[in-house]
Amino acid sequence: MKDMCCKLSIVNPVKGRGPNGEKPRGGLAALRGTLRSRSSIVTRRAGFTLLEILIALAIIGGALITILHTVNYHAGLTYEDALSTRMVLMAREKISELELEPMNKKGVLEDKDFSYETIVKKIEDPEDGEAKMISEFLELKAIVRGHGKVVELSELVIKKPDQEIK
């Protein structure tokens, strides 16, 4: 088989000059010059500059900070919502206890992070007119405090004849 080789044209046939405008050189010197100039172009374009890397890092850093801030913000909102829900459930539990046995009292809930206060007030029906005290209402109020928050629930119930406020 014949050896096949590539021809490397170093002379521009139209102008009689090399690819960079230099006068043509003959032989091996011409080949070295052409290869050197082409390899320097390739190595110059092969990587990124420091400025490009710094800009990319700044963009990634800005995006990462935004994402972390958003995640932390929503985690805080979730915590506050869970805390508020827990306090409302505790206040509802105290209202249920007041329906069975109405009494004013204060205390600390089992978590020790929350305190509560229950208030029972007699309220007369303003529409009874002459027949006052036939139907008495009780306002049951439960207040739960903790973690810098206050939840207050109140409910109106008709007082049972045998029910006393303690």
Image (cartoon, grey):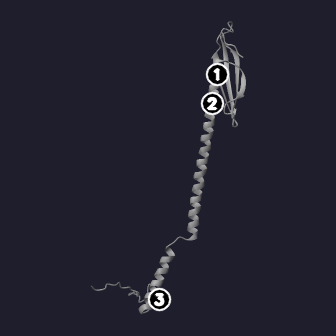
The residue indicated by pointer 1 is 97
Q: Position of residue 65 (x, y in %)?
A: 60, 54
C-alpha separation, residue under disc 3 versus residue under disc 1: 101 Å
Q: How many numbered circles are shown?
A: 3
Front disc: 2 or 1: 1
How crowded pointer 3 is (Cα within 10 Å; few <14, some 14-19, many 20+) is rated as few
| Amino acid type at mark 2 | Val
- Toward the viewer: 93 or 44? 93
Please indicate whether residue 117 sits to the left or right of residue 51 in the image. right
| Amino acid type at mark 1 | Glu
* C-beta proximity under 8 Å, tags 3 and 2: no
Secondary structure at badge 3 equals: loop
Regarding residue 83, the answer to whether it shows in the image is: yes
Residue at x-position 56% and y-position 59%: 60
How crowded pointer 1 is (Cα within 10 Å; few <14, some 14-19, many 20+) is rated as some
| Amino acid type at mark 3 | Glu
C-alpha separation, residue under disc 2 versus residue under disc 1: 14 Å
- Toward the viewer: 130 or 61? 61
Q: Quadrant of the C terminus?
A: top right
The residue indicated by pointer 3 is 22
Secondary structure at badge 2 equals: helix
